[in-house]
Image (spheres, rainbow, N blue to C red):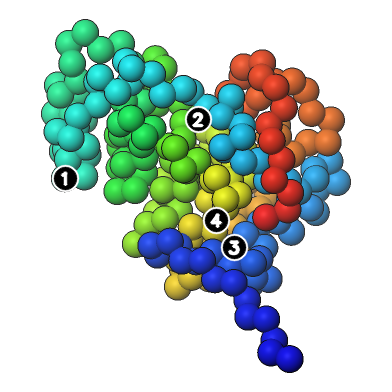
């Protein structure tokens, strides 16, 4: 009888395997479970979109390839701000295409810490709680980079640590997007910061959950997809 082979699903540079005990996800899960007040669960973005800002026509109308290219090319904050339509009331980070992929997703993918910090802190309506139609959050893109940017990761987690347990439509959390060649760097980062109050979820994994979601809105309970 042939031994059944372990399934390996590849998506770009991400390595999606059944949980490897040496993976960043396994290290993070152990950190979560070591806290008595938390229970490990993964929340599926597809079933729990009530956690995230909706894709509206206003967000789509303000989006342009010009803005995206400027973010990718390293243009200044002033230059990018001038590309926003005059009548736009949406935070520039929230502008997105019809698939929900936002300027924020692009900024995370290209490590634009300056842009993210500026528009999150200095303009109204900025939030990290957005996802594309695949359920990927900005933290998924920040983990899915050619080189780890821990300044960016720290900024995101200080704002929304609960994103660490938000899975895409397959239930893959951001740490599962980390390329395998960077696992050791990521595990070092997690262990070095395990006592930081911004590394572990603040709301969604606590056993005594309230009805308040991480985005401070009253929503139904998210769909659970079980252990990752």
> Is residue 175 shown above or below 46?
below
Residue 187 position within the rendered picture, expressed as x and y whole percent measured from the top left: 58, 64
Q: Secondary structure at mark 4?
A: helix
Mark 2 highlights which residue?
129
**Residue 119 appears in the rendering:** no
Tag nearer the camera, 1 or 2: 2
Residue 94 position within the rendered picture, expressed as x and y whole percent measured from the top left: 36, 26
Going from the N terminus, do you reach mark 2 or mark 3 first? 3
Going from the N terminus, do you reach mark 2 or mark 4 first? 2
Q: Report if the CB atoms under discs 3 and 4 are less than 8 Å apart.
A: yes
- What is the distance, in whole Å, between disc 1 and disc 2 at their CAs? 25 Å
Circle 3 Cα neighbour tier, 10 Å, few/some/many (<14 / 14–19 / ≥20): many
- What is the distance, in whole Å, between disc 2 and disc 4 at their CAs? 17 Å
Q: Secondary structure at mark 3?
A: helix
Q: Secondary structure at mark 2?
A: loop
Residue 19 position within the rendered picture, expressed as x and y whole percent measured from the top left: 66, 66
Q: Residue at x 80, y 43 (%)?
A: 38
Q: Secondary structure at mark 1?
A: helix
> Is residue 101 shown above or below 60?
below
> In the rendering, which numbered label is found on residue 175?
4
- What is the distance, in whole Å, between disc 4 and disc 1 at their CAs? 26 Å
Mark 1 highlights which residue?
73
- What is the distance, in whole Å, between disc 2 and disc 3 at their CAs? 23 Å
Residue 118 position within the rendered picture, expressed as x and y whole percent measured from the top left: 33, 28
Mark 3 highlights which residue?
24
């Amino acid at each position: 009888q042939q031994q059944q082979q372990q399934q390996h699903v590849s998506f770009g540079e991400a390595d999606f395997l059944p949980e490897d005990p040496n993976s960043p996800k396994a290290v993070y899960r152990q950190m979560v479970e070591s806290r008595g007040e938390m229970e490990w669960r993964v929340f599926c973005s597809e079933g729990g979109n009530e956690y995230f800002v909706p894709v509206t026509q206003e967000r789509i109308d303000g989006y342009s390839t010009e803005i995206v290219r400027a973010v990718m090319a390293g243009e200044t904050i002033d230059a990018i701000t001038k590309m926003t339509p005059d009548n736009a009331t949406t935070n520039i980070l929230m502008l997105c295409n019809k698939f929900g992929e936002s300027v924020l997703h692009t900024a995370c993918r290209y490590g634009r810490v300056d842009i993210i910090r500026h528009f999150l802190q200095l303009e109204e309506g900025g939030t990290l709680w957005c996802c594309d139609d695949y359920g990927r959050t900005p933290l998924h893109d920040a983990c899915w980079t050619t080189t780890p940017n821990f300044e960016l990761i720290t900024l995101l987690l200080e704002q929304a640590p609960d994103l660490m347990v938000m899975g895409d439509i397959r239930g893959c959390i951001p740490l599962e997007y980390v390329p395998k060649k960077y696992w050791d760097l990521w595990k070092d980062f997690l262990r070095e910061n395990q006592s930081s109050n911004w590394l572990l979820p603040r709301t969604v994994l606590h056993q005594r959950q309230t009805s308040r979601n991480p985005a401070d809105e009253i929503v139904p309970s998210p769909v659970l997809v079980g252990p990752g």
